[in-house]
Amino acid sequence: MHTRYYTNLIGIAFALLLLAAPFNAFAAISVDATSKGTGSSSSTFTHVVGSSATILVVVATAAGGGSQTIGTPTWNGANMTLAAQVNSSDGSSVAIYYITNPATGSHSVSISCFNSSSCSGGAISLLGSATVSPIGGTGSSISEAGSTVSATVTTQNASSYIIVGVTTPVNPGTYTPNDAETAWVSSTIGNSGTPQGGQGQGYVATNSGSMSISWNTPNAPIARALEAVEILPATSVTATPTSIVGLVSAWWAF
């Protein structure tokens, strides 16, 4: 009888300790500020980062060159880190860069594009992101026909923020996202009468796992490039609830 009594007490104590164990919580990522700029072989524009921003992400697009490349963007003179990029062979490139704990205040984003007639970029600063290893899943796609370009991203966290960049060597004003995404950068530039440029947008993930991202673009036999990157949320350890601690203390006192 005493053995069963003490066994039950031990079981109850163990359960209470499990309930009292600290656990991880994920921060909600929110937008701090956005900005954009465009040019032919380069693009420089001003972005204002708030004091609580944890990451700055830049979507850079190049179009129209056939063998175009995108150089490493800088923020306030500091090189940014490449998250992911996609390059087509006939006129479209998208690269997504980031820098954690960015310098606050008003500074310049500078992007250089090579062998390109359109160099566009957009920046978005976020609050609540991870600052160590902030990149989760990525996905990219190149479409040479039809009117849709799609990519799949396997997200790691349902509280993540997804950044997408898309471009094609025709008017980006006709781009339409097939999901509930919010456009935050759009630009066009003329080249021999043909407007070119790129778009980028971001939205909060609603679940972890496989996510399909799709955009409608002009229906023409040209390359459409799409790149998507998952920005992971920050984690914090939640302390043991006071009520549980009190309950365990009362049990031991008894």
Image (cartoon, helix red, strand yellow):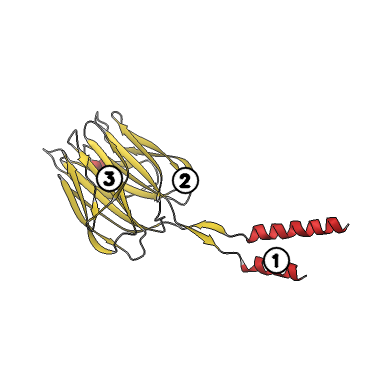
Which residue is most to the front? 3
Residue 156 shows which numbered tag? 2
Q: Residue at x 24, y 43 (%)?
A: 61
Task: Write down the residue under mark 1.
Answer: 248
Q: Are marks 1 and 3 in contact (CB under 8 Å)?
A: no
Q: Residue at x 18, y 50 (%)?
A: 43
The quarter in which the N terminus is drawn is: bottom right
Q: Amino acid at mark 1?
A: Val
Give the x, y percent position of residue 202.
36, 49
Earlier residue among tags 1 and 2:
2
* Front tag of 2 and 3: 2
Earlier residue among tags 2 and 3:
2
Real-space Cα distance between discs 1 and 2? 35 Å
Q: Is residue 219 above or below residue 234?
A: above
Give the x, y percent position of residue 99.
32, 54
Task: Write down the residue under mark 3.
Answer: 199
* Front tag of 1 and 2: 1
Query: Mark 2, residues whose alpha carbon is within 10 Å: few (<14), some, or many (≥20)?
Result: some
Q: Amino acid at mark 3?
A: Gln
Q: Number of numbered discs present? A: 3
Residue 15 shows which numbered tag? none
Earlier residue among tags 1 and 3:
3
The quarter in which the C terminus is drawn is: bottom right
